[in-house]
Image (cartoon, rainbow, N blue to C red):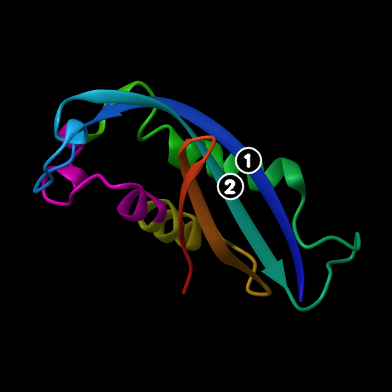
Amino acid sequence: MYEISVKLDFSAAHNLRNYRGKCENLHGHNWQVEAVFGACNLDKAQMVLDFKVARAMLACVLEYFDHSYINKTPYFKRVNPTSENIAKFIYDKLKKKIKQQRVSVRRVSVWETPRSCATFSE
């Protein structure tokens, strides 16, 4: 299996529901997101996926969050905006954007801070 990864970031605010502590209050992060794509075989150019294409797909998904109050976005009005749920949301959106059958989204990791990360994979 070959894999590539791309990282992008976005800035947004959120607050956690059903949580006791500081994070139940409105606060913001400069989130960093890494998306990993994989394939068993390389394409004609000997790549899993062009980095430019991978970054563009991720950037399109992250537009949903950038400079938003995540709790007010349609999906997260009903889902708690934890890093785990944000990683799954991004994973699911990227999975729908993949046009090439041989390429798959392997995992998505979301950092709230440089030392705190949540990852989703199937």
Of residues 51 and 11, the one nearer the viewer is 11
Query: How far across and down, in percent of the image, does residue 27 sit?
Result: 25, 24
Residue at the spot x=63%, y=58% of the render?
36
Q: Mark 2 or mark 1, which is nearer the start of the sequence?
A: 1
Q: Which residue is mark 2?
A: 34
Residue at the spot x=73%, y=40% of the render?
52
Q: Which residue is mark 1?
A: 7
Mark 1 in CB contact with mark 2 (< 8 angstroms): yes
Circle 2 SS class: strand
Quadrant (top left, top right, bottom left, bottom right) of the N terminus? bottom right
The amino acid type found where label 2 is placed reads Glu
Q: Is residue 79 left or right of residue 12?
A: left
Query: How far across and down, in percent of the image, does residue 76 sit?
Result: 19, 44
Residue 81: give its label. none
Say few, some or many: other residues with alpha carbon within 10 Å of mark 2 (under 14 / 14 to 19 / 20 or more). Answer: some
Give the CA separation, mark 1 to mark 2.
4 Å
Examine the rendered structure and indicate whether residue 99 appears above or below residue 21: below
